[in-house]
Structure formats: C-alpha cells, structure tokens
Amino acid sequence: MKRLTVSRSENIKEQIQLYFSGNDEAKYIHRLHALLLFTEKEAESCDSIGLLLGHSPRTISNWIKRINESGNIESLRSKKQSGRPSRLSEIQRQELRSVIVESPEKHGFTCNKWNGKSLSAYITAHYGIIMRTRTCQRLFHQLGGINHAQAGVSEEAQSGKKRKAPNPQNPIENEKH
C-alpha cells in the first residue's frame, strides 16, 4: 500500500500538541501511548520515542520509572500543582474585582486609570498586605482589569492595524489616514 501523506502536516501537528498541552486526560493517554510504543517495540529507545512524540528522552525515562515504581498506569496522570498560595483571600479578590472597574479617583488616587502601582498602594492601604508592582500587574490581569482602553492602547493597536507612514510626496493621501 502506498504511504499516505497529511496535507498541512506542521499545522496539524501543532494543533495536536496544543490539544495535549491543554487537556489532562489527553496528556495521560499520550503518555500511555508512549509507554505502549516502548513496550511493543524493543528496538525503540527513550531517545527515538521522545523524538517521535516531541519529548526529551529524560521525560520518557521518567514516565517509565514512574510506572516501574508504582506498578500502576495511574501514576502517569497529571497531579494538581498547588503553587504558592495567594496572599489575598477570595473575598478580598472579589472586592478588588469590583474596585478596579471604578475610577481610582473614587478611592483617593490621583491617577485616572488603575495600574500595578496604584493597585499595590490600594492593597497596602486597605488590607495591610504589601505586594510589589509587578505582582499587582499580574493580579490586575487575572481579575479581568486589563482591556485596551484601560491600558492606554490606541484603537488602531486594538484592531491590529498598522498606521501608515506619511508620504511627503502625496499630501492628499496623508489626509486619508
């Protein structure tokens, strides 16, 4: 039988990898397939399977070690990563959501739009928690506070249109833009 080809294979490959990266169950099945390949194809190594599936040989090796240590395929499931706990309670985060839709001037600040610095000052004043500007910028984004108008981005930048440079030889054309 003649070998088939996948049209736009790079695009399809990217879509598959994006699906795997955003779906825990798909990651689990992907890992199971890697181990199935490894067990069925004795000539294959961690290097070749990693290359085939887009992982490092160390990753494939780690999956095999997890299976060997636990004796159970469930060990390949992704575990919830807790990360550092938030310094703000959920109630405080909810309060901040409603605060950032209002003008900073309403809360005693002289700036006309919220940013990381003003949000940091607000959190320190109201909750007694000191947070750095960059952390507050991240928090501001997580709370849904960033939109193009608040960030001071022009309408042209919002739409993705680039401004055409003026043409010194044709002033009429310049007036159109």
Image (cartoon, helix red, strand yellow):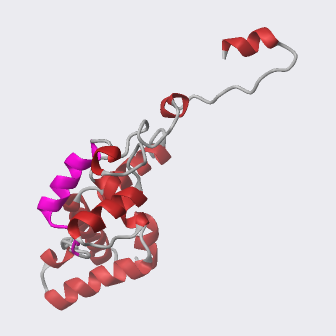
Q: Main secondary structure of the magenta part?
A: helix
Q: Position of residue 31 (x, y in %)?
A: 27, 69
Can residue 2 be seen? no
Q: Which residues are magenta?
A: 85-101
Can residue 10 be seen? yes
Q: Position of residue 87 (x, y in %)?
A: 23, 72
Vertical side of 154 occupied by 76: above or below: below
Magenta stretch holds residue 86? yes
Q: Position of residue 17 (x, y in %)?
A: 37, 55
Picture quarter with the C terminus:
top right
**Looking at the image, which is closer to me, 95 or 146?**
95
Numbered disc total: 0
Query: Left or right: where does residue 88 sit relative to residue 91?
Result: right
Picture quarter with the N terminus:
top left
Vertical side of 42 occupied by 106: above or below: above
Query: Left or right: where does residue 10 sit relative to residue 68?
Result: right
Residue at the image point whose x is 41% and y is 40% from the top: 150
Residue at the image point whose x is 46% and y is 69% from the top: 51
Residue 68 picture quarter:
bottom left
**Looking at the image, which is closer to me, 3 or 27?**
27
**Looking at the image, which is closer to me, 66 or 40?**
66
Magenta stretch holds residue 124? no
Vertical side of 138 occupied by 66: above or below: below
Query: Left or right: where does residue 59 sit relative to residue 102?
Result: right
Point out the residue furthest to the top here. Answer: 172
Point out the residue furthest to the right here. Answer: 169
Residue 157 picture quarter:
top right
Vertical side of 162 occupied by 77: above or below: below
Residue 73 picture quarter:
bottom left
Residue at the image point whose x is 75% and y is 12% from the top: 173
